[in-house]
Image (cartoon, rainbow, N blue to C red):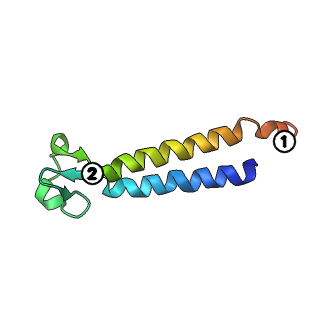
Amino acid sequence: MHQYLIPAGGITAGAGFMTMLFGWEAPGGVDIAEQISTVGFSAVSDISLNPLGQLAFALILLGIGMMVFANRTAWKETGGY
């Protein structure tokens, strides 16, 4: 089972990291990935997480959880190697 769950977990976590690019917004609802000129590089305290960012964190945690779950018994299936 781990031969399918580990790649699926990696794809899920990778999708979460890619979704994270558009998961932040500046005051006024502007995407930071699109409008860095309106926010500036020193506006870290003004950045907030939008619903897409919450989905990204959930995908990352789900993907890591899938890989950990699949790896916990993989050594038994491979004979310890």
- Distance in Å between CA atoms under marks 2 and 1: 41 Å
Q: Is residue 49 visible?
A: yes
Q: Which residue is mark 2?
A: 24
Q: Is residue 65 left or right of residue 55?
A: right
Which residue sits furthest right? 79
Q: Earlier in the sequence, mark 2 or mark 1?
A: 2
Q: Is residue 39 left or right of residue 48?
A: left
At label 2, the amino acid type is Trp
Q: Is residue 65 above or below residue 33?
A: above
Which residue sits furthest front? 51
Q: Does dot 1 land on a helix, a strand or a loop?
A: helix
Q: Is residue 32 left or right of residue 59?
A: left
Local packing at callout 1 (Cα closer than 10 Å; few below 14, some 14-19, many 20+) is few
Counting from the top left corner in percent of width and height, residue 71 is at 70, 40
Q: Is residue 18 above or below residue 42?
A: below
Name which residue lies at 22% across and 45% down: 48
Q: Which residue is nearer to you in this view: 75 or 52? A: 52
Q: Which residue is nearer to you in this view: 78 or 55? A: 55
Q: Is residue 5 above or below residue 77?
A: below
Name which residue lies at 71% across and 35% down: 72
At label 1, the amino acid type is Glu
Q: Is residue 63 left or right of residue 70?
A: left
Counting from the top left corner in percent of width and height, residue 38 is at 11, 58
Counting from the top left corner in percent of width and height, residue 31 is at 22, 59
Name which residue lies at 85% across and 43% down: 78
Discs 2, 1 touching: Cβ within 8 Å: no
Q: Which residue is mark 1?
A: 77
Counting from the top left corner in percent of width and height, residue 7 is at 65, 55
